Image: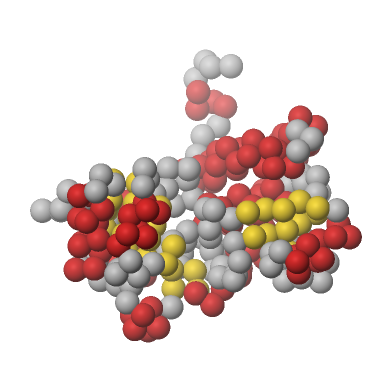
Amino acid sequence: MAAPNEITPKQLLRLIGTPDCPLIVDICLAEDRAEDPFLIPGALIACHEDVTQIADMSAEKHVVIVCQKGLKLSMGMASFLRAHGVTAEYLAGGMAAWRAQSDAPSIPLSALPKSTRWVTRHRPKIDRVATPWLIRRFVNRDADFLFVPADQVLNVAEKYSATPFDVENVPFSHVGDHCTFDAVLDHFNLRTAVLDTLSNVVRAADTGRDTSPQAAGLLAVSVGLSRMYKDDHSQLNAAMPLYDALYRWARDGQSETHSSFGDAT
């Protein structure tokens, strides 16, 4: 019988990438992490001995605790957090069970940037909005994004220890037919069938290539948002639900058409 405070890898996979994704805290031992140096997308690293720190970061959030096998470390931490009023679960089977899923992405520890700050050109439209969405939903939910004039991106990146993106001569930018969204997917090992579908739409809308029927709609809405908001951060916040919706369409809504709604108009 399943424990009342456990979540299965399959259940967690359905939540990752959505606004309802819980805070994932990885408390694997150093030796286990060295042997299997990967993280669940969006997971934060903490030490199981830092119970106060974990309780503070978990306050008022739904939390999933992850250890290597889903036993004593995560079970104990989940129970401790629940005793302090936190809605906490442990991942059944731990990282071992997560990694056994063929469709579950895992981020290499070596891919994580040293800073949670990112910087790009101001007045974003598509790629510079889709990429922050991808990073916040799959890499770091608390990532900060700075929007500055194009000729100052690299200078700001140096002064604020930020990762530059969508400018020339940086790792996270356009390469051939692929855009920055693709570069982030590749770097963080996030290629899945769902995100590949979404990347096709983003790429077509961003580059003008006629390879996705959804691209024209994304372009139109993106241009509209850029006209509605003078502040780039407000525009990004307003666009997050748009990409959440596109992700859900790519995941489990592609089979629906206008005729699926019967007489609805």
Question: Is 58 situated left or right of 260 in this image?
Answer: left
Which residue sits furthest left?
A: 1
Residue 242 lies in quadrant: top right
Which residue sits furthest right?
A: 151
- x 76%, y 30%: residue: 228
In this rendering, does residue 220 appear at all?
A: no
Colour scheme of the picture: secondary structure
Q: Number of labelled discs?
A: 0
* Viewer-nearest residue: 39 or 200: 39
- x 85%, y 60%: residue: 152
- x 56%, y 70%: residue: 112
**x%, y% of residue 111?**
56, 73
* Viewer-nearest residue: 51 or 36: 51
User: Which image quadrant: the C terminus?
Assistant: top right
From the viewer's perspective, is residue 209 above or below residue 264?
below
Residue 54 lies in quadrant: bottom left
* Viewer-nearest residue: 224 or 255: 224
Which residue sits furthest front?
A: 52
**x%, y% of residue 95?**
33, 69
From the viewer's perspective, is residue 17 above or below residue 167?
above
